[in-house]
Image (spheres, helix red, strand yellow):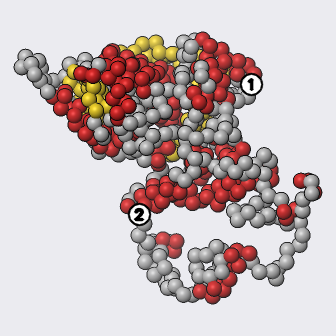
């Protein structure tokens, strides 16, 4: 039978046709039947729930067990609303949304999500996430969006933009990846991660619709974990509701799940090589994918790029008739001075100059990120020539920026710094910052890298600025074996400068011991440091070891 001649009741939703999901409930039944309803027919949900044999808690059924539980006493003390009572008529005791029970619920959800494809396994397509958005009522279109893609700096820029929007008086949502310690970090409202309980509730709310999308996949590819998390973020922002959302693309741009949003402002951070198996062998190839977040009529705010990358990005803006703001042309860093705990900046924005801006982060790359974030928020609010944001609000927003795992000091003596650099470009920026802004007598690196990353490039960038390296592994099953990393480090550093330890905690203890070791009585003990880096996972594991809370 030709597809178009199928009986209505035999058709199923088609991922290639989002409209086919219209009128479908969470059990997969078609609503709005054109025939007159049979009012005497048995209720489908009642039957699914076991009919009269089903107890309270089935699917839409009460059955003959309606009165088996305690009958609520609706007499309450003055000042207590009825919805605050439990079934005994006493005020309900609400649990800690990040307490043990909530964490157990979170872990159960994570165990279920981890059965899906991880972020490292992709089937490039927006069909599945678009189908989910259709089923959920398009929560991706309920608020203006600032979308960020690039190779390095996305998370830092996202946090800066979020802080600026919040200081300007908007309720904001932020979606970033990956997380350092706890998955709830990925979805933030008003600058703070959602609770464990809210994370579990979001998943449970959309799970029936995710199952429908899985069932409609003709190629057998279910929604990936990242796609489901993206759906949860959009739902959270819609429920809040937020007045602006900041989205970080997970990988690429054009076919990244976050790209079902149509951003008013598209931000492109520096582009280099990473994920070459999906994004291509050259930075220009990666740029072509990442440029996909630039939509018709939007404003593209672009960080400084290599010429061939910039050409690709500008070509996209012409194709979709997007406005352009470029670092080094329309905005940039005018002055920067190293300060205690960060740096003082003078920034050229789209609407004028912003001076005396304190940024509590280290490195010229973070100053560039600040200029990029500022220009993005100016574009969001329509700032331009002679139309500037409130300078004092900008200063306050940048002073309040928190960026865990980015040259973060977690111990004072000896100093222990954590940085999530996970590719050669990030490692080079880290090495430059160490050289320019720190004066360590001795610096020992603790390095754990994921197996698919360019470990040689990372180690090569760090070699000139550290005295020794302790290689180890992090908690990820994808972590490079210690033996392989030690062999690679030995070829770059020389075997006398390389130690290997089986786990991160032992490696950090060994590094601290090396820094505190003093064979020369005339050499000062002060001025030693430990740098823990190589992976986002490594940075997160180290934060946990030093008792830092997810943020």
The image shows residue 492, relative to residue 39, as above or below, that is above
The image shows residue 15, relative to residue 517, as above or below, that is below
On screen, residue 397 versus residue 375, left or right, reads left
Tell me the crowding category of disc 1: few under 14, some 14 to 19, or many 20 or more residues within 10 angstroms, Cα based: few
For image coordinates 60% across by 11% down, the residue present is: 307
Q: Earlier in the sequence, mark 2 or mark 1?
A: 2
Who is closer to the viewer here, 415 or 251? 251
Q: Are marks 2 and 1 in contact (CB under 8 Å)?
A: no
For image coordinates 46% across by 12% down, the residue present is: 334
Who is closer to the viewer here, 437 or 288? 288
Secondary structure beneath dot 2 equals helix
Secondary structure beneath dot 1 equals helix
C-alpha separation, residue under disc 2 versus residue under disc 1: 49 Å
Furthest toward the left, the residue is: 521
Residue 404 is situated, as x and y percent measured from the top left of the image, at 38, 36
Tell me the crowding category of disc 2: few under 14, some 14 to 19, or many 20 or more residues within 10 angstroms, Cα based: some
Residue 291 image label: none
**What residue does disc 1 label?**
320
On screen, residue 523 versus residue 320, left or right, reads left
The image shows residue 536, relative to residue 10, as above or below, that is above
**Quadrant showing the C terminus:** top left
Residue 475 is situated, as x and y percent measured from the top left of the image, at 38, 43
Who is closer to the viewer here, 318 or 141? 318
* Residue 43 appearing in the image: yes
Who is closer to the viewer here, 285 or 168? 285
Figure quadrant of residue 7? bottom right
Mark whose residue sits in front, 2 or 1: 2
Figure quadrant of residue 288? top right
For image coordinates 61% across by 58% down, the residue present is: 207
Residue 321 is situated, as x and y percent measured from the top left of the image, at 74, 22
**What residue does disc 2 label?**
101
Figure quadrant of residue 261? top right
């Amino acid at each position: 039978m030709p597809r178009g001649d199928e009986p209505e009741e035999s058709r199923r939703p088609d991922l290639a046709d989002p409209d086919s999901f219209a009128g479908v409930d969470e059990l997969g039944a078609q609503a709005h039947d054109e025939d007159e309803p049979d009012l005497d027919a048995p209720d489908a949900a009642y039957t699914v729930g076991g009919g009269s044999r089903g107890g309270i808690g089935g699917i839409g059924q009460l059955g003959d067990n309606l009165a088996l539980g305690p009958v609520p006493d609706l007499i309450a003390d003055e000042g207590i609303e009825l919805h605050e009572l439990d079934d005994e008529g006493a005020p309900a005791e609400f649990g800690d949304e990040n307490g043990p029970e909530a964490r157990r619920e979170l872990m159960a959800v994570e165990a279920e999500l981890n059965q899906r494809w991880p972020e490292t396994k992709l089937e490039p397509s927006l069909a599945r996430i678009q189908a989910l958005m259709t089923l959920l009522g398009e929560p991706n279109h309920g608020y203006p969006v600032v979308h960020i893609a690039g190779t390095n700096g996305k998370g830092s820029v996202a946090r800066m933009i979020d802080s600026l929007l919040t200081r300007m008086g908007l309720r904001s949502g932020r979606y970033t990846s990956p997380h350092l310690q706890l998955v709830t970090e990925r979805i933030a409202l008003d600058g703070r991660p959602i609770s464990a309980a809210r994370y579990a509730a979001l998943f449970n709310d959309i799970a029936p619709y995710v199952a429908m999308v899985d069932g409609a996949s003709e190629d057998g590819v279910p929604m990936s974990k990242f796609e489901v998390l993206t759906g949860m973020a959009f739902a959270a922002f819609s429920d809040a509701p937020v007045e602006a959302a900041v989205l970080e693309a997970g990988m690429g741009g054009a076919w990244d799940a976050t790209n079902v949003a149509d951003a008013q402002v598209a931000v492109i951070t520096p582009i280099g090589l990473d994920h070459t198996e999906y994004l291509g062998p050259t930075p220009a190839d990666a740029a072509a994918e990442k440029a996909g977040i630039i939509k018709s009529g939007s404003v593209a705010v672009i960080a400084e790029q290599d010429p061939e990358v910039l050409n690709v990005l500008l070509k996209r803006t012409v194709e979709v008739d997007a406005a352009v703001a470029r670092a080094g042309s329309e905005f940039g860093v005018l002055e920067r001075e190293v300060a205690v705990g960060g740096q003082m900046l003078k920034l050229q924005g789209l609407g004028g100059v912003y001076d005396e801006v304190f940024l509590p982060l280290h490195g010229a790359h973070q100053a560039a990120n600040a200029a990029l974030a500022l220009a993005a928020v100016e574009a969001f609010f329509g700032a331009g020539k002679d139309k500037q944001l409130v300078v004092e609000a900008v200063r306050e927003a940048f002073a309040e920026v928190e960026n865990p795992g980015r040259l973060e000091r977690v111990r004072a003596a000896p100093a222990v710094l954590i940085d999530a650099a996970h590719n050669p470009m990030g490692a080079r920026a880290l090495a430059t910052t160490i050289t320019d802004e720190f004066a360590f007598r001795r610096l020992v690196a603790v390095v754990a890298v994921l197996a698919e990353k360019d470990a040689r490039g990372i180690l090569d960038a760090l070699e000139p600025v550290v005295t020794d390296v302790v290689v180890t592994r992090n908690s990820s099953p994808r972590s490079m074996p210690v033996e392989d990393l030690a062999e690679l480090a030995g070829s770059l550093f020389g075997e006398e400068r390389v130690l290997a330890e089986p786990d991160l905690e032992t490696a950090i203890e060994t590094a601290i011991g090396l820094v505190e070791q003093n064979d020369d009585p005339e050499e000062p003990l002060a001025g030693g440091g430990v740098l823990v880096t190589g992976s986002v996972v490594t940075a997160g594991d180290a934060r946990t070891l030093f008792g830092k809370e997810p943020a």
